[in-house]
Amino acid sequence: MDLNQKVCIVTGGGSGIGRATALLFANHGAYVAVADVNENAAHRVAGEIGPNAFGIRVDVSSAQDVESMVQKTVGRWSRIDVLVNNAGFGTTGNVVTITEETWDRIMSVNVKGIFLCAKYVIPVMRRNGGGSIVNTTSYTATSAIADRTAYVASKGAISSLTRAMALDHAKEGIRVNAVAPGTIDSPYFTKIFAESEDPVKLRSDFNARAAMDRMGTPEEIAEAMLFLASDRSTFATGSILTVDGGSSIGNHLVK
């Protein structure tokens, strides 16, 4: 799954799935723009990669930030071949308890962020003769989880947006797909476990979401990202690749 000399942007690249994806792409020969709202994290990951990467602070909900990211990437490497729209976040809350401000922020980052990144990257890909876009959705887009209303809604929107973009741009040689991870053992959850009154039980509860009775790793999701980004998946567009350890396949939670 070679990405030799392909130019890739990975948003949310400073940690977790984004970091693992950036590192894996670089190991397969890619030039990587590591974009993250946490500038220090972006530079740290770019430093792990070396001269074939650079870090940049980007709030993907800001058109100005996104346009600047694209311009800097093109200015450095003249093209963009792959865009991984991985930036996103979630928080607890149902439609009654979540605040309007939090709802708007989740939608702005998770959904509008993909719209903006695609809006500015696709014209560059057109000039290249094509490209590959990989979005991060979630298994919760189709099966939902309790008390995560805005997050689940945003991931459902991402899956639909993926299919719409794929249809609109297929004849331009631009493929658009998505990976739907399950619960991933990332720094986000490490912090949650550390702050819990019973970290062992909480981790066990998260493990139980999957039929495989464990959380996934960022590296496992990165492998799926690599497949969809690379020329090993040239007939795939509008696809949602679920990598969730069996979280969405049945009634494994019923004992």
Image (cartoon, rainbow, N blue to C red):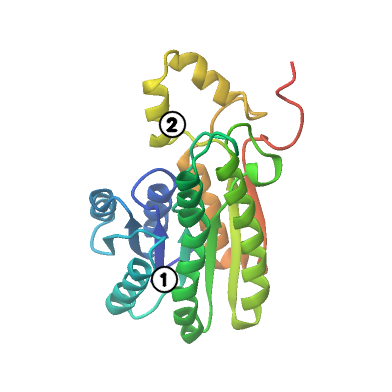
Q: Earlier in the sequence, mark 2 or mark 1?
A: 1
Q: Position of residue 188 (x, y in %)?
A: 41, 36
Q: Position of residue 32 (x, y in %)?
A: 35, 63
Residue occupied by mark 1: 6
Residue occupied by mark 2: 189
Q: Residues within 10 Å of mark 2 (few under 14, many from 20)?
A: some
- Position of residue 228 in the picture relative to residue 124 (left or right): right
Find the distance from the CA under tag 2 to the CA under tag 1: 32 Å
What residue is drawn where x is 23% and y is 63%? 51
Q: Position of residue 7 (x, y in %)?
A: 39, 70
Front-most of residues 18 and 87: 87
Q: Is residue 137 above or below residue 72?
A: above
Which quadrant holds the C terminus?
top right
Q: Position of residue 132 (x, y in %)?
A: 53, 69
Residue type of the residue flagged with mark 1: Lys
Label drawn at residue 194: none
